[in-house]
Image (tube, grey):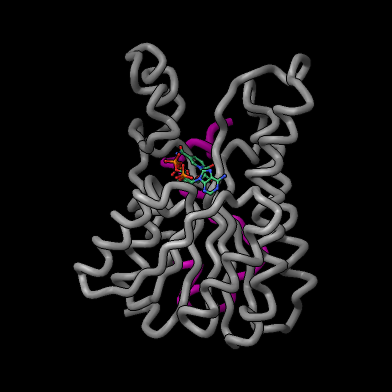
Amino acid sequence: MDLQGRTAIVTGASRGIGRSIAELFAAEGAQVALVARSAETLEEVSAVIRAAGGSALTIPVDVTSPEAADDIVTATLDAYGGIDILVNNAGGNTFMSPIASLRASGWAKAIALNLDASVRLIQAALPSLIASGHGSIVNVSSVSALRAAPMIGAYGAAKAALVSATQTLAVELGTQPVRANALVPGWIATDLTGFLREDEGIEHTVLDRVPMARWGRPEEIAQAALFLASDRSSFMTGQSLVVDGGLSANP
Ligand SMILES: NC(=O)c1ccc[n+]([C@@H]2O[C@H](COP(=O)([O-])OP(=O)(O)OC[C@H]3O[C@@H](n4cnc5c(N)ncnc54)[C@H](OP(=O)(O)O)[C@@H]3O)[C@@H](O)[C@H]2O)c1
């Protein structure tokens, strides 16, 4: 097992990509701190992990709240005594608008969830990640970060900034024993993208651009997260791992 004895914080662990990451990490031997707003769904994930013989802690919190980062780190340290892995996965986009008419509040909301919350959690967890001697930070970005993201411009900008912050962090950390990488999914079948599957025409337009012509599965992103979080990627830092069925290879 690749993560035996390691402790991982996974935000957005109640469903979708984060849930798959948490379940895979637990199966690989990690003790997992599960973060999301819904206590009930976190308990469901925790129960599944414990039933499979793993160890999980639930931390129901809104990652955009000012005290969230300290609360998450304190709860994890209280339960497990250290932090080896941080997966900043909580994120998403709940509205669509061209940048020209985007309200300041909408811009701020997207940045708060998809950028600020991750940076604050990195800052709070960093001393423990360094102390572990083999820390790994995985920041979940998006292909929206790589090029234009019409109608979801604030989300794309936040995810692009997260890639930039990941690169800078890796350089600033230098020889300290923490690696930081971005994980860049393409279109993945989760609740977040459910509305795109409700209309066949829209779904067709989405998948038309994907060379593999299908949705990615959350488990496929979890496998890439496992690679970045574990010592299997021990000489990799400041990079972006794109998992998108070939979408970003398009001209
Ligand atoms: N699905 C895709 O196609 C795709 C593509 C590229 C990148 N991504 C990125 O991958 C990540 C996961 O996406 P997903 O598709 O798995 O989304 P999802 O199914 O909507 O799940 C989002 C998770 O984040 C949690 N969350 C949302 N807002 C939160 C907050 N303020 N505080 C704490 N937890 C919060 C949700 O739980 P609660 O609602 O209970 O809080 C849930 O566990 C996101 O960062 C997303 O931007 C997704």
Q: Nearer the viewer, residue 213 or 21?
A: 21
- The x and y percentages for residue 120 are 71, 59
Q: Is residue 221 visible in the rendered structure shown here? A: no
Picture mark count = 0
Q: Quadrant of residue 153?
A: top right
The x, y position of residue 228, in whole percent, is 50, 67
Mark yes or no: residue 4 visible: yes
Above-or-below relation of 73 to 231: above
Answer with left or right where residue 123 lies relative to residue 1.
Answer: right
Residue 173 sits in quarter: bottom right
Q: Which residues are magenta?
A: 227-251
Q: Determine whether 127 is above or below 10 in the image.
A: below
Position above or below: 243 against 198: below
- 44 sits left or right of 160 in the view: left
Left or right: 186 in relation to 73 = left
**Residue 239 highlighted magenta (yes or no):** yes
